[in-house]
Amino acid sequence: MRTERIGFIGAGQMAEAIARGVLAAGLFPPAALAASDVAEPRRRLFQELGIRATERNLGIIPECDVLLVAVKPQNLDELLREIGPSLRKEQLLITICAGCATALFESAAIEPVRVVRAMPNLPVRVRMGATALCVGRYATQSDLELAHEIFGAVGNVVVVAERLMDAVTALSGSGPAYFDFLIEAMIAAGRREGLPEPVARALAVQTARGAVEMIIAEDLPPGELRRRVTSKAGTTEAAVRRLEELNAREAILQAIHAAAERAKELGRRM
């Protein structure tokens, strides 16, 4: 069990998921966590987990070794003006704010603050998240390892260069919505073909889950697995041919590119 104390600045759903994950993994005890949020219901939820919660951000900063910033990017400028002068070089700051560079946090502090930037996605709520990490100017290998442990409690973790974080945001940060969109369309197709909604939903969801598990278990490229189940002149071939005619692959490439461009735009506004 780690001995550091973690303060969550912002107690929204992502912060809650991370807190629940580290508690469930036994990485930290509840007494080692603290949280701040302006919303009383969010504070109450953290308190029900045994975590001290307060309305004041400055109320948790002095006591914490690690500060995990989990606020909306549009609120970040105001937050940094508030907390920047209180940050100490002995503290590690982990940010999950989309599109916000490590340099933004470093420039807000008086002392050389150690920053690790993380981009988790929503499946951290079920401990199946995908998180990418990158380090700021002053962060150490030990800082990266601690962040890896924290996010490893809620899913898989990769380390990338900061210049790739916009691509990460587009691919995995927004990625769950793409699969939701596909499954939603599959359910609609099943219903149009005459299946009751509960049956269409059960089949589509389990099919998606099984396809992902096969990719993991077989350790083969998805394209190879697709070819193995695509019999000549069969039903799968008919479906894939139609997807190719509709240029579905290019649509996906363009969608993820649009998300990456939007992430860059958000970063430039900071």
Image: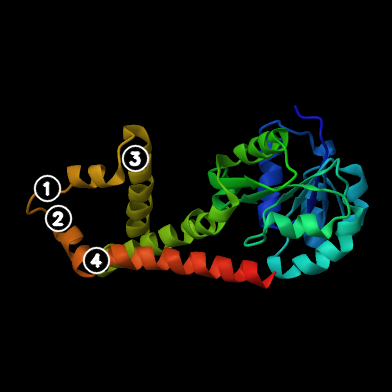
Q: Which residue is mark 1?
A: 231
Q: Nearer the viewer, mark 1 or mark 4?
A: 1
CA separation in Å, label 3 and label 4: 30 Å
Residue 126: percent from the left, percent from the top? 57, 45
Q: Where residue 231 sits in the image (x, y, percent)? A: 11, 47
In the rendering, which numbered label is found on residue 215? 3
Whether tag 1 and tag 2 are in contact, CB under 8 A, the answer is yes
Q: Is residue 159 above or below residue 183?
A: above
Quickly name the residue at label 4. 194
Q: What amino acid type should be assigned to the residue bearing mark 2?
A: Glu
- Pick the front one: 225 or 128: 225
Q: Position of residue 71 (x, y in %)?
A: 73, 61
Q: Are marks 4 and 2 in contact (CB under 8 Å)?
A: no
Apparent side of residue 270 relative to residue 164 in the rendered image (left or right): right
Q: How would you rate the neighbour count of disc 2 (Cα within 10 Å): few for under 14, some for 14-19, many for 20 or more? A: some
Q: Residue at x 64, y 49 (%)?
A: 118
Query: Dot 4: within a 10 Å radius of its alpha carbon, few (fewer than 14), some, or many (20 or more) residues?
Result: few
- Label 3 crowd (10 A; few <14 / some 14-19 / many >=20): some
Residue 9: quarter of image: bottom right
In-image side of 39 versus 222 (left or right): right
Q: Earlier in the sequence, mark 3 or mark 4?
A: 4
Residue 28, relative to residue 211: is it above or below?
Answer: above
Q: Residue at x 64, y 70 (%)?
A: 268
Horizontal side of residue 134 vs 262, given as left or right: right
Q: What kind of residue is marked 3?
A: Ile
Residue corresponding to mark 2: 237
Q: Amino acid at mark 4?
A: Gly
Query: How far apart in space, not on screen, are marks 1 and 4 (Cα)?
Result: 25 Å
